[in-house]
Amino acid sequence: MRLYYMTAAKWAEVILKERRLKLSRFSEANDPFELRIIDSRDRAVRKYAELICEYFEKNVGFICFGASWRSPVMWAHYAEKHSGVALGFEVPDELATKVEYTNDKIQIPFGPHLPKHGLSADLLTKVRRTKASDWAYEREYRVEAELTIQDRTTGLYYTEFGAKVDLREVIIGHRCSWSMAKTRELVGKVDRPVRICRARPAFGRFEMVEQRLVRSAVIGADLKSSARRTRQGPL
């Protein structure tokens, strides 16, 4: 599955140089309702809802992706007003979780009279993968990981590029100062082909499209043909 990670140019530069993505904590998200989809006006319910939040905040991190790089709003919100970059990754379908959207908080009974106090696996999954309908424009997917290995320098948690998160595209923002040459240098040596192009506003619709006047490039294009020869055998 091809998914897109949008960010400011300065952070994209760090990501490409270090070849890793930071795992976000739920408390760092820009949505204050992360994990808080349970109607918790009742104090007893609120107690359990807070326990759920504390557990996931401590143990689970995630990377947020979008299903497309073409939304002008996504560029505005997450790529520094179109001056940033969209990184396209190939992610195994089984690792990518689609976020669901709702207009209403859910009502859940809790208490010692219920199995596991009402904390079912289905509920815990729904809590961390549901957001308010106002966020539906993001078409968000997530890759989750346990917070196990902490970077000693930054104190943060990361997922490195590789089979699970495989860089395949770099889309330079419409207002981004990066040149094709600089982008090629930042991408560097790759194990699989990575395509680079620049975005622009479409002429006939409200969507970002590829700027055809700027010639795209594929780093590691020879790797694709080499892999094809390997599969097919010698010519």
Image: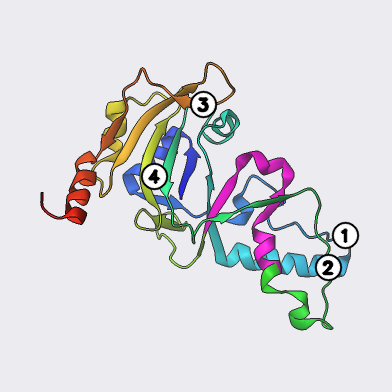
Q: Name the residue carrying label 2.
A: 45
Q: Which residue is nearer to you in this view: 73 or 32? A: 73
Which range is magenta? 123-143
Q: Which residue is at 56% across, 67% downward? A: 59
Dot 3 falls on a residue whose secondary structure is strand
- Where in the figure is residue 26, as x and y percent of width and height? 62, 55
Q: In the rendered image of this protein, does residue 147 appear above or below residue 5?
A: below
Q: Name the residue carrying label 3.
A: 208
Q: Which mark is residue 158?
A: none
Question: What amino acid type should be assigned to the residue bearing mark 3?
Answer: Met
Q: Name the residue carrying label 4.
A: 15
Q: Are marks 3 and 4 in contact (CB under 8 Å)?
A: no
The answer to whether residue 82 shows anywhere in this view is no
- Where in the figure is residue 211, as x and y percent of width and height? 41, 22
Closer to viewer: mark 1 or mark 3? 3
Going from the N terminus, do you reach mark 2 or mark 4 first? 4
- Where in the figure is residue 126, as x and y percent of width and height? 68, 62
**Residue 38 vs residue 211: left or right?**
right
Q: In the rendered image of this protein, does residue 110 appear above or below residue 12?
A: below
How crowded pointer 3 is (Cα within 10 Å; few <14, some 14-19, many 20+) is rated as many
Question: What amino acid type should be assigned to the residue bearing mark 1?
Answer: Arg
Q: Are marks 1 and 2 in contact (CB under 8 Å)?
A: yes
Q: Which residue is nearer to you in this view: 230 or 64? A: 230
Q: Is residue 135 magenta?
A: yes
Question: What amino acid type should be assigned to the residue bearing mark 2?
Answer: Val
Dot 2 falls on a residue whose secondary structure is helix
- Among the 4 quarters of the image, the one containing residue 123: bottom right
Q: Name the residue carrying label 1.
A: 41
How crowded pointer 2 is (Cα within 10 Å; few <14, some 14-19, many 20+) is rated as some
Q: In the rendered image of this protein, does residue 221 appear above or below residue 47?
A: above
